[in-house]
Image (tube, rainbow, N blue to C red):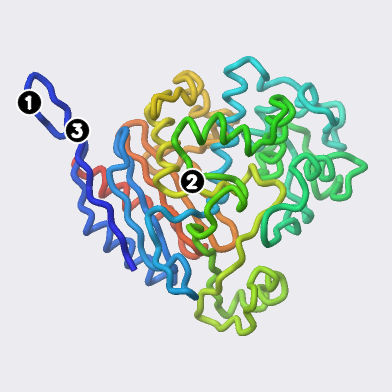
């Protein structure tokens, strides 16, 4: 039911003296916090990792990766991590920005083979900065919600974006897909906007977005088990997403999501029901499939500002720009990354059917927390806060 990695202590040799460079962790206290949360919220399985400086100092797995087949959760379990994925997409964009291949404040149509405008304000260009900060006026219509399906997507990212955002497209709806406000004037969270960012990467680099990420982010960082599509990863290591059935959601599950529960007929109240491994064509917004350890490589590259595994992911000045407030009157939104009102942690969360995830870190304490769980019950950020307090006790 539970596997645990030992607590790693980092030592620095200075003038012949060996001294610890990371805070000690009360891992038993963390275990108790998580066990109580899982029991109270009916969570099948969780994986938690703590980054201290440039190391993943501790990680642990709890409960079940697959209830039906009694498969325990493991620390190397892969999961579709929902909107934390956006931080990878933003990194790809900012790499191209560093190289001078795009400008954050230029009309996106400069980089596209198709033309995209908000039909309510066709004279106002949409920029990459708008997309990164959720101020583009592009929103998630019913076609986006309907695009979820078992297995990998059956249309390409290019087809999806073209069909959703151009007037002749099958999924185009001027009222559902765009705000009435002009670009740059309203903050409205947009998954489709991040699909469009992935497509911009494709247009500039002339390669599929998933391939670009593999060559320029995953392989250099050593994220060898990470991928965007099911056919890119070892599906045997993939955690099964679950939905907890209660009195309030049972009818909705039966009516709207039955196709995601292969072979399930009962939907008994008080049980966690396994879903299929699903996807959607707008995948750069939320379909990264990775494990806590490999995601920590990416987080450590951001925390240590430039280099992890001898790979310069982004320049320090670029990271500083990403972790700065970008929207007037919004003391939260950076370039993709958001600052929480707890301890000024920077990070991102994620939620999709059967998954909930968080990845946050402090630039002051150099501590980061990653949490995966394979249903979407509870308030995971509250648990992250408790774990962060334990991880920083010796630093105060």
Give the number of the disc on residue 21: 3
**Quadrant in which the C terminus appears:** top left
Q: Secondary structure at mark 1?
A: strand
Query: What's the mark number on residue 17?
Result: 1
Q: Is residue 261 above or below residue 128?
A: below
- Marks 2/1 in contact by CB < 8 Å: the verdict is no
Image x and y of residue 11, in percent? 17, 32
Q: Which residue is mark 2?
A: 225
Q: Quadrant of the N terminus?
A: bottom left
Label 3 crowding class (10 Å Cα cut-off): few <14, some 14-19, many 20+? Answer: few
- Confirm whether residue 396 shows in the render: no
In this view, the mark in front (1 or 3): 1
Residue 273, image x, y percentages:
55, 74
Please say if 124 is above or below 137: above
Say how many tags the image has: 3
- Front in this rendered view, residue 181 or 104: 104
Q: Secondary structure at mark 2?
A: loop
Q: Secondary structure at mark 3?
A: loop
- Marks 2 and 1 sit apart, C-alpha to C-alpha, by 38 Å
Percent position (x, y) of residue 74? Answer: 38, 59
The CA span between labels 3 and 2 is 30 Å
């Amino acid at each position: 039911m539970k596997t645990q990695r030992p607590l790693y202590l980092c030592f620095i040799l200075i003038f012949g003296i060996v001294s610890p460079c990371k805070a000690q962790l009360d891992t038993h206290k963390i275990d108790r916090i998580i066990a109580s949360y899982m029991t109270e919220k009916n969570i099948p399985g969780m994986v938690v990792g703590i980054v201290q400086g440039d190391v993943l100092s501790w990680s642990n797995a709890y409960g079940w990766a697959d209830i039906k087949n009694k498969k325990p959760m493991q620390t190397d379990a892969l999961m579709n991590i929902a909107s934390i994925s956006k931080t990878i997409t933003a990194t790809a964009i900012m790499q191209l920005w560093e190289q001078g291949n795009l400008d954050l404040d230029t009309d996106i149509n400069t980089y596209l083979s198709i033309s995209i405008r908000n039909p309510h304000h066709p004279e106002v260009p949409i920029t990459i900065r708008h997309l990164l900060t959720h101020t583009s006026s592009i929103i998630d219509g019913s076609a986006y919600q309907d695009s979820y399906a078992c297995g990998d997507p059956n249309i390409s990212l290019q087809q999806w974006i073209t069909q959703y955002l151009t007037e002749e497209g099958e999924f185009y709806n001027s009222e559902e897909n765009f705000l009435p406000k002009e670009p740059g004037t309203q903050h409205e969270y947009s998954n489709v906007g991040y699909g469009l960012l992935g497509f911009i990467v494709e247009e500039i680099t002339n390669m599929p977005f998933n391939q670009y990420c593999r060559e320029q982010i995953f392989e250099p960082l050593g994220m060898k088990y990470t991928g965007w599509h099911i056919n890119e990863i070892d599906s045997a290591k993939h955690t099964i997403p679950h939905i907890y059935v209660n009195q309030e959601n049972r009818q909705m599950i039966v009516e709207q999501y039955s196709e995601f529960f292969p072979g399930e007929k009962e939907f008994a109240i008080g049980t966690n029901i396994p879903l299929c491994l699903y996807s959607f064509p707008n995948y750069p917004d939320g379909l990264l499939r990775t494990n806590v350890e490999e995601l920590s490589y990416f987080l450590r590259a951001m925390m240590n500002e430039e280099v992890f595994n001898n790979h310069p992911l982004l320049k320090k000045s670029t990271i500083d720009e990403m972790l700065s407030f970008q929207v007037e009157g919004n003391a939260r939104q950076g370039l993709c990354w958001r600052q929480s009102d707890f301890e000024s942690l920077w990070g991102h969360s994620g939620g999709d059917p059967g998954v909930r995830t968080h990845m946050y870190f402090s630039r002051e304490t150099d501590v980061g927390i990653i949490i995966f769980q394979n249903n979407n019950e509870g308030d995971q950020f509250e648990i992250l806060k408790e774990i962060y307090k334990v991880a920083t006790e010796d630093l105060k």
